[in-house]
Image: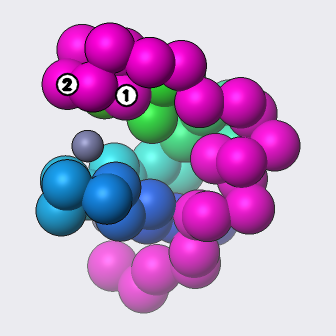
Amino acid sequence: MHKHLTCACGYVVHADSDDEMVRKAQDHSKAAHGKMMSREDILKMAKEAKH
Ligand SMILES: [Zn+2]
Ligand SMILES: [Zn+2]
């Protein structure tokens, strides 16, 4: 299932699995904002996407 997570800064993370979503969102959060997001928060914010 494809999912999107829109960061507070407008950056959109695309992923095809929960593990990929968590990894990519944590990479972005750390690189762009200098902080780590929890797996729970990431999966709560991620939404199903159709493409
Ligand atoms: Zn961001
Ligand atoms: Zn996408």
Q: Residue furthest front?
A: 34
Give coordinates of residue 39: x percent, y percent. Answer: 74, 33
> In the image, which residues are magenta?
29-51
Residue at the image point whose x is 59% and y is 30% from the top = 37
In front: 21, or 16? 21
How many residues crowd around disc 1 within 10 Å: few (fewer than 14), some, or many (20 or more)?
some
Q: Is residue 34 magenta?
A: yes
* SS at badge 2: helix
Whether residue 24 appears in this view of the structure is no
Question: Which residue matches tag 2?
Answer: 32
* SS at badge 1: helix
Whether ligand 1 has any atom under 8 Å from the Cβ at mark 1 is answered as: yes
**Answer yes or no: do the residues labelled 2 and 1 have beta carbons within 8 Å?**
yes
Whether ligand 1 has any atom under 8 Å from the Cβ at mark 2 is answered as: yes
Residue at the image point whose x is 19% and y is 55% from the top = 9
Q: Say if 16 sits above or below 27 in the image.
A: below
Question: Which residue matches tag 1?
Answer: 29
Residue 50, label in figure: none
Query: What amino acid is found at the position of numbered circle 2 in the picture?
Result: Ala
Q: Is residue 10 magenta?
A: no
Label count reads 2
Whether residue 33 appears in this view of the structure is yes
Taking 11 as reference, is 13 left or right? right
Q: Quadrant of the C terminus?
A: bottom left
